[in-house]
Image: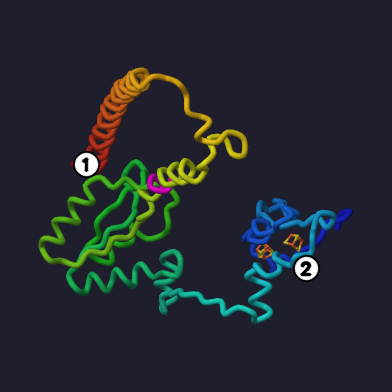
Amino acid sequence: MKGSEMKLYAKKEECCGCGACADVCPAHAIRMDRDKEGFDYPCADGSVCVHCGRCEEVCPLKNHFSGKCSNQYAGARAKDEKVRYSSSSGGVFPVLAQYVFERGGVVYGAGYNGCMEVVHREANNLKELKMLKRTKYVQSNMQNVYRGIKKHLEENRWVLFMGLLTIPVVWIVSEAGWVTAEMGRQPWTIEGLLPTRAAVSAISPGSVQLTFWMFVVVFAGLLVAEISIMTREIAKAARRDILSSGH
Ligand code: SF4
Ligand code: SF4
């Protein structure tokens, strides 16, 4: 321990590095330090600590050990060890997939194409499912997947989709962040310095409208350019996929 450094845990097993203590500390006495293996652990500065005890209260591991809170978790894993180790995260995917296959359904998941790119694919049996097992830590190409799913749903077949439902969430969170930031700072234009009412300028409505429409024209042009580049690149990638799959 260096100088006034306080230890929040005795052994690394007593800290999962969640960072809740650092966030809750009202004195900003706790910082997360990276160890030589690349994991972040909290380190508290005793000279700033006001001994409020919040870091102890919030810690999930300390509360778990003391029995103060009823930690509740839900999880599942495949009973069959072979199935479990053939997949990731407890092997639940093949178990669910088998259930769907037994009912004549299809399964969609992330696999690789001939160029080793991650793409979503359809599997109709356990043999085809092999290529969809194991976690892939990159974004998957979803081309034609929704069309296939729609077709199978129209045929009244079971469909199991495995993949990131979080892909659109990034966009939603980013937009929601802007709304929260803009609305949350009212009544300030600059927090603590310039109230919104004092920030009103004497520019005429005509000038504001002119600037607004200029921005609309410029950004509309940029949008058209971006969409045309994107569609051209998507078409190129699709042609490459078709060629690589030998069709
Ligand atoms: S006791 Fe309070 S002030 Fe001290 S480190 Fe913990 S949370 Fe921060
Ligand atoms: S709250 Fe507990 S488990 Fe989380 S970083 Fe702090 S000491 Fe570690």
Q: CA distance from mark 1 to mark 2?
A: 59 Å
Q: Would you identify the image quadrant in which residue 239 lies?
A: top left
- Of 138 and 146, nearer the camera is 146
| Helix, strand or loop: magenta stretch | helix
Q: Which residue is mark 1?
A: 246
- Of 183 and 121, nearer the camera is 183
The numbered dot on residue 133 is: none
Q: Amino acid under label 2?
A: Ala
Q: Amino acid under label 1?
A: Gly
Name the secondary structure under disc 2.
loop
Residue at screen point 27% across, 58% down: 108
* In-image side of 107 versus 49 (left or right): left
Which contiguous range is marked in magenta? 170-174
Q: Would you identify the image quadrant in which residue 153 lies?
A: bottom left
Which of the marked residues, 1 or 2, is nearer the chain's N terminus? 2
The answer to whether the residues at label 1 and label 2 have Cβ atoms under 8 Å apart is no
Q: Which residue is mark 2?
A: 10
Task: Give residue 106's position: percent from left, percent from top.
Answer: 21, 63
